[in-house]
Image (cartoon, coloured by chain):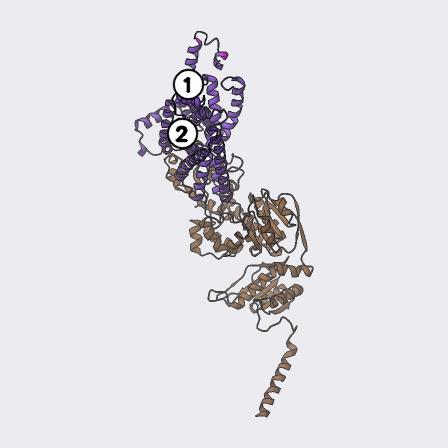
Amino acid sequence: MTPILSRWLPGACVWLHAEHRQKALYLLILLLPLPAAIYCIGLGRYAIPTEDVVRALLDFALGRHDASAGPDIVYNLVTRVRLPRIAAAMFIGANLAVTGATFQGIFRNPLVDSNILGVTSGAGFGAALMLLLVGDPLEVQLAAFFVGLVAVLLAYSVSRLYHSAPLLVLTLVGILVGSFFSSLTSLLKYVADPLDTLPAITYWLMGGLTDVTLGDIPALAAISLLGMVVLWGVRWRLNVLSMGDNEALALGLNPTRLKLLIIVCSTLMTAMAVSVGGVIGWVGLVIPHAARTLVGPDHQRLIPATMALGAVFLLLIDTMSRTLLPAEVPLGVFTGVVGVPLLLVILRVNRTGWR
Amino acid sequence: MVKRTWFYGLLVVLLVGAAAPGVVPAQAQAADGPVVLALESAREPVEAWAAAFASMEGGAALDLRFVATASEIMARAGEAAVIISDTYEETPPIAFECGYISDVFMLLPGLGARYLASNSCSGVLDPRDALARDFLRFAISPAGQQLAIDLGLLPAVVEIVDQSGATVRVPQPVWRIASPYSIATYYVYGVGAADRLVAAGYLGARDPEGKAGMLKLDPNFETIANAVSTLNQQEANIEELAALHPDLILASARTSWLDAAAALGVSILRFEGESPEALQDAMTLLGAVLGPHAAYQAEQFNAYYSRTLDAILAQTQTIAEPVRVYFSGTNPLRVASGDMYQTAMVEAAGAISVTADLTGYWNDVNLEQVAVWDPDVILFVPYGGANVEAFTGAAEWSAIRAVYEGRVYRLPKLSAPWDTPVPDSILGIIWIAQTLYPDQMSLDCAAETMTFYRLFYGYVMSEGEAQSICK
């Protein structure tokens, strides 16, 4: 493992032993989300001086905002627009990235992410169905979440019917279930009213955090934190799983039960992310590879680093999306445009990890 | 006894014999049929229409009277149920106790007609007046057009350049129209040719409110809307469409399946009517292929449209600080770009659209950008679940000027939403102008709405209904 930074910055790090350099870099990555969030909350289309941002945040944190004083644009923007969006971007980014890393581990395949079992297609179908039938944002979100879970449950139980090469079958069935739900979504788009429900479905599927409000954050935060704690807890076992089932059994682990736990956990996190932010691609693929380049393939460090980098990546992308132009660039588009070239560079630089 | 019978018989023969020389010409003439008073120069087509009308089911023989000059028609209009003249713009100087004089039916270029519903006192059209109306409807129908074509008075083929720049040959008359372009469907109503629609999409008529409105305009529209299982911009069931034998398809530049439709050998018109000027061109274009009456209606619509825009412009020109409007779509943060019809409407109403610099279709923005714009007024579309609570009930919107000043409004609609480029959108412009500038604007939305739907949809709306739409 020759982490890239130690090659780039030999002079700066020369006083550190290679192992210490690794550790410093790892700690730096873990701490990165905090300054990134602080930096991004000061940015926006509406210019707000730093001291006003700080005051609004303090008012919010201490609950001393006086609502009777009339509409306060600065307070509203900082606490009701920027804060929820930054929180949502970071949670969703962390979720998508870390579930991508765990799926790559348990499927022993660098090309999968948490969508491989159809959660995103399922969620998309659930959302489209609700947009067509009722259009209420809360119900759309709930439907996305639960149909996403149903899709994965379907893929998992169908794959149990086959008795050969479980991982391969699971991958295949997952792809099939995903395609099935995508077809159902197309069917809904086909019958949707071109004037109202069709654009709503299309925009939803493109993904974006424009509509995130403070009310979306508690559920997102709860599921995300819970999932992260679990994945953090099993991170060394992922190393064992990624060696194969026989090795895991030999080391005294029950690979089937462990995988189920990880899949349930990752699916909950992904479904939550999709139900809030729509379909945001590439994070689950690009970030784990980037993290692997920086801290190596050991899941002990890879899992925390992926969370931190995923949070920072989506935060930066979303900040660009909300500040660059008067009209927002759909997030799913931006992650692809930025993520794909990034992945190509990483794959060129990092020839280790996947052999 | 026998002598007496013989005497009465002779009397009858004598009387009939004496009356017989007065019957000129013998066919299609009935002393008690509705009187049609027409210019002598129009004798040929009028007699042809009358003969055909007399022989059709629900038709009747008419009492045709021809005079030499238009002024004589005006002078003698009191004796007629139908007047046909080249001075059709004038209304005859007759005062009815009740009843009314109809709008113009354009029979041939330069030859217009009206019926005089003089007997309709009960509020229901008298059967005699209904006959007069039906005769004129027949004369402007494809069958009536066909008679005029046979006489060489109308062209057998119209060749025209559509809005995509293609030259289209449309054999005349057009009997059966299919309109996958759900905006053009309303053009057809606007030019008074809705009875020729055999299959069509209806913009905005899927939601309950739009459907209820459309049922008022055309109680049978659902038959037309469901005639072909799939008929829209993206797709069409070509075989079902072919089975309806349309001879004209109304499409837009975005209709994607027209190569398949071209195989049917049907004339296809492509519209691109999504600006005030282009909407008027689209109406003219459609009018040109659907006969003289449709052409006249298109002209009337365009005149009404430009007259209204001029009136609004005259009243908003002097306003020093135009209102700044934020036009929102199916989601509060989805806004109309500067390329869209909605922005043109806002500008025509004498206001500034804060989103005019955006391009393309609907754009997603974020609330910070809205705060930068800080609009005076928010308008939102009447479809797709857009509602005022999304603005007034959301804390994050509370510091936006339009929200805390209580100026958030939903665009009205009857069937098609007034913010889309259908003919009704002129009412949308009037409504926006009146809503933004209640003190400066002399146009009255409710009154204009009643006039508009009577003229261009043939729907007589109560004042109460017009008020509730415009509120």
The chain containing the residue under callout 1 comes to A
Tell me where residue B135 appears, x and y as whole percent.
Answer: 58, 64
Question: Which residue is labeled 1 in the image?
Answer: A301
Please give the letter of the chain rendered in purple.
Answer: A
Tell me where residue A7 appears, x and y as whole percent.
Answer: 50, 12
- Cα gap from disc 2 to disc 1, whole angstroms: 22 Å
Q: Dividing the image into 4 quarters, which one contains the N terminus of chain B?
A: bottom right
Tell me if residue A14 is in the magenta stretch.
yes
Image depth: mark 2 or mark 1 in front: 2
Q: Answer with left or right where residue B253 lies relative to residue A61.
A: right
The magenta-colored residue range is A7-17
Q: Answer with left or right where residue B89 lies relative to residue B169.
A: left
The amino acid sitting under disc 2 is: Leu
| Vertical order, A247 against B108 (above or below) | above
Total numbered labels placed on residues in the image? 2
Q: Residues within 10 Å of mark 1 (few under 14, many from 20)?
A: many
